[in-house]
Amino acid sequence: MATMADVARSAGVSVATVSHVLNDTRPVLPATRQAVLTAIEELGYTPNTLARSLVTSRTRSIGLAVSAISNPYFTEILQGVEAGALEHGYSLLIADPHDDPEHERKVVQLLHERRVDGMIVAPSADPDALVAYLGRHSVPTVFLDRVVDAPVGDASGDALPFDQVCAENIEPTARLVTHLAGLGHRRIGLVAGLPGLSTTRERIAGYRHGLAAAGLPHDERLLAHGDSESDAAERATATLLSLAAPPTALITANNAMTIGALRALRGRGLSVPGDLALCCFDDFAWADLFEPRLTAIAQPSREMGAEALRLLLDRLAAPDRPAQLLRLPCAFVHRTSCGCPERQESPNSPNSLINPMSSISPGRETSRDRRRR
């Protein structure tokens, strides 16, 4: 097995110069750097990561705490993080917090004890213990998908010292509501996510904005919580369908809840969109294979993961820079579960993008509208 001394002899430099190239601890002339890299490639030299970490106080590893096992939505985000990490020479240590605050705190501590250089975390609905731990130990961290505010009781008024990256939630959800209202629906239900999550709060806010923009009243009975998972969403959908005046259209606020809602509809022998129109937040790989094909909001999952990794690397390079909150736009994927006929539209068409709230307007009343009151 080749050693660092072998690389130095082959490149005609000192062992110290090889170390500087590997660890970026001192500037090296481009020609010298290339000679070292060529020698490494020809000899098949593999750096000792443990020894390197002792020199640089960096392990070139990143902790990723997301519910990738229990929530398929995070799989694409993981792919975005991993691609960027590999490109920059970092490895990933992955843990699943299961959206449980106590378990979340434990897995983050375990990642920290393994001396990761920084973390990317999709926080739970009650992240105060998580925030306190990361702040106490000054762990460079990016919060992903869900926005975290300062803990309740924090009177400092200071913003959290953590970067955050997430998708837009309010305008895309409002777009689904106004689309359904434009098709004549007057009783539009929402199966919302787990209370406490910022995504849940924002999608409920978007639902209400959409109702107001369409000139529809907000009926609390048409909103049920599916707790961001399939079984609870099935029960929530059944509750909505049992109302004396059930919804004629339904929005599900994530992909797992869409599955639960479809299960509830099938259990009652109801068809989509014949008996009930359906739109969902989260496009997913098999949404195009359902019959009817699911009209959905597509989140930029891989981009979110890539941006989270970029923000973390920027934080490691400049620990004192101000924290950033980055929101990425979503896309409206128009299919047929909403009750619209099939149509051809490029994914990059301007019509597929989420319009600003100012452009949302209620649809004109039609004979179909009157039937759906």
Image (cartoon, rainbow, N blue to C red):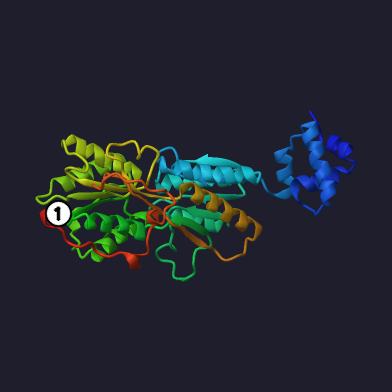
Q: Can you say whether 334 is above or below 328 in the image?
A: above
Q: Where on the picture, by quarter, is residue 219? A: bottom left
Q: Nearer the viewer, residue 276 or 21?
A: 276
Q: Nearer the viewer, residue 177 or 143?
A: 177
Q: Where on the picture, by quarter, is residue 200? A: bottom left
Residue 113 visible to the viewer: no
Image location of residue 32, percent across then percent down: 85, 47
Image location of residue 256, percent across then percent down: 33, 42
Please rate how many residues cluster around mark 1, counting C-alpha atoms within 10 Å: few if below 14, some from 14 to 19, many from 20: few
Q: Nearer the viewer, residue 31 or 242?
A: 31
Residue at image x 57%, y 56%?
Answer: 311
Residue at image x 61%, y 57%?
Answer: 314
Q: Is residue 116 left or right of residue 349?
A: right
Q: Can you say whether 76 is above or below 319 in the image?
A: above
Image location of residue 249, percent across then percent down: 21, 50
Q: Nearer the viewer, residue 335 or 18?
A: 335
The quadrant of the picture occupied by the C terminus is bottom left
Image location of residue 13, percent across then percent down: 89, 43
Q: Report the amino acid beneath label 1.
A: Arg
Residue that badge 1 annotates: 368
Q: Is residue 354 left or right of residue 77?
A: left
